[in-house]
Image (cartoon, rainbow, N blue to C red):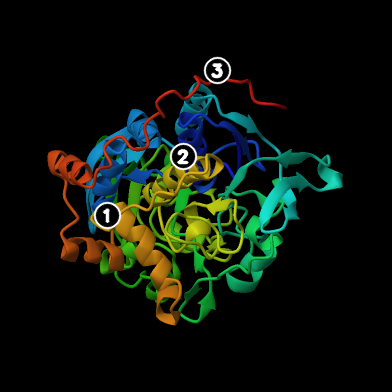
Amino acid sequence: MKIVVIGGGWAGCAAAVSAAKQGAEVLLLERSDMLLGTGLVGGIFRNNGRFTAAEEMIAMGGGEMFAAMDACALHTGVEFPGHSHASLYNVAAIEPAVRRVLADAGVQVHYNVRITDVEMAGRRIAAVSTHKSEGARRFAADAFIETTGSAGVPNVCNAHGNGCAMCVLRCHTFGNRVSISGRAGVPDIAGRKLGRTGAMSGSCKLHKESLAPALREELERTGVAVVPIPEGQQDAGAVDKLSFKACQQYALPAYKDNIVLLDTGHAKLMTPFIPLAELRSVPGFENARYEDPYSGGIGNSVRYLGMAPRDDALKVDGVDNLFCAGEKAGLLVGHTEVVTTGVLAGYNAVRLALGEPPLVLPDSLAVGDAISHVREQMQTEEGLGLKFTFCGSVYFERMKARGTYTTDVASIRARVAAAGLTDVFAARAGAPARVPVRAAA
């Protein structure tokens, strides 16, 4: 069995490990020189319903990515506006940690590989390849998993956002995102927000060293700092900015009236952008400097532009051996959300290669309900204007209404057991041990 995963963000890494645990030979192709994509500037997990979803995955035997996050946590049990019991991982330490997880699972990782073309054999992908100008490399497999995300490319950010923000995705350096499902003949789906295409990425990073010493000390001691914006200096367009951003769980008055920072190694600024002159007019931010995106004072990257139609097993419609995960799989916001889809996609890709029926998670689990609910919502005009996350906005409200949100780990494990899914994603009995392979140059 050979599985190729295209895209090394959180979803791709989770998919690769999941497939390798089932005994497959797994190749992960990443267009840049680092894993995790937007996870390199993320850092928030276990807040609100994300705690429930993470513990469901752990109970089902698919918790490797959450273990890596926990091991790199700078703060746990953090409370900030609208969010409880959050953990914050160190964005500077997480990527090497995930590399080690992949190596231990025997996943082969190839960096600087941008897939641009697809060879079809009927309704199946036979192989994927790079452009001849990038080395003309070809990769065949029994099944493919696309986790290329839905952000960019620069001309899209120019057309639907405030211009290229020179963000962590580094399109200019490593090439634009290419839709594999689109290359296979499946039309992409674009989300919308307030009449605009896509949605703006949710936050920026500031150098902690550029903050006032007292503010930095508070941030590093508690994990969070909430700084009121002086009266008369509040941005009249702040409400619009919060409404346009992808992460609707932060579209709250507290994020309009205050500068909210989280300590994820850098100082995570929980608004999509604030003009630098305005930011520096607030006490404590006189010397503030953006870390990522470098043009964060003007805008941020635009996401949810290239989603694939798929079923609840995460197989892409119209292609028999292509699965998707992460933002490619729908209007899901956050690392926890995309990791859950990655684990399921990796598992089901192997089941396809073995000729076994796919696993569809039941709606008694928050993870199963989210996957099916998002698919249903993507088929409606109203749903395409929404974003879904376990930690806030419309889906967290759904979790509370359905009674799936809880922080009681024993209760979560009992729910997984009642569904007959305890350790379902654990290593397949009799699967050959994978010897870690050094990633190719």
Residue placed under numbered mark 1 in the picture: 366
Q: Which mark is residue 435?
A: 3
> In the rendered view of the protein, which quadrant contains the N terminus?
top right
User: Is 353 left or right of 311, judged from the image as shown?
Assistant: right
Q: CA distance from mark 2 to mark 1?
A: 18 Å
Of the image marks 2 and 1, the number of the one nearer the N terminus: 2
Q: Determine whether, in the image, residue 16 is placed left or right of residue 319.
A: left
**Amino acid found under the numbered disc labelled 3:** Val
Label 1 packing within 10 angstroms: few (<14), some (14-19), many (20+) = many
Which element carries disc 3, helix, strand or loop?
Answer: loop
Residue 320 point in image, percent of width and height: 59, 55
> Please, what is the three-letter code of the amino acid marked with disc 2?
Ala
Of labels 1 and 3, earlier in sequence is 1
Asked if disc 2 and disc 1 are in contact, CB closer than 8 Å, the reply is: no
Q: What is the spatial separation of the Cα atoms under label 1 and label 3, in whole angstroms?
A: 34 Å
Instruction: Residue type at mark 1: give it.
Output: Ala
> Helix, strand or loop at disc 2?
helix
Q: Quadrant of the C terminus?
A: top right
| Residue at 39%, 47% in the rendered image | 340
Which quadrant of the view contains residue 390? bottom left
Residue at 33% x, 38% y: name it.
424
Q: Earlier in the sequence, mark 3 or mark 2?
A: 2
Say what secondary structure mark 1 lies in.
Answer: helix
Q: Which mark is residue 14?
A: 2
Residue 6 seen from this side: no
Q: Residue at x 45, y 81 (%)?
A: 381
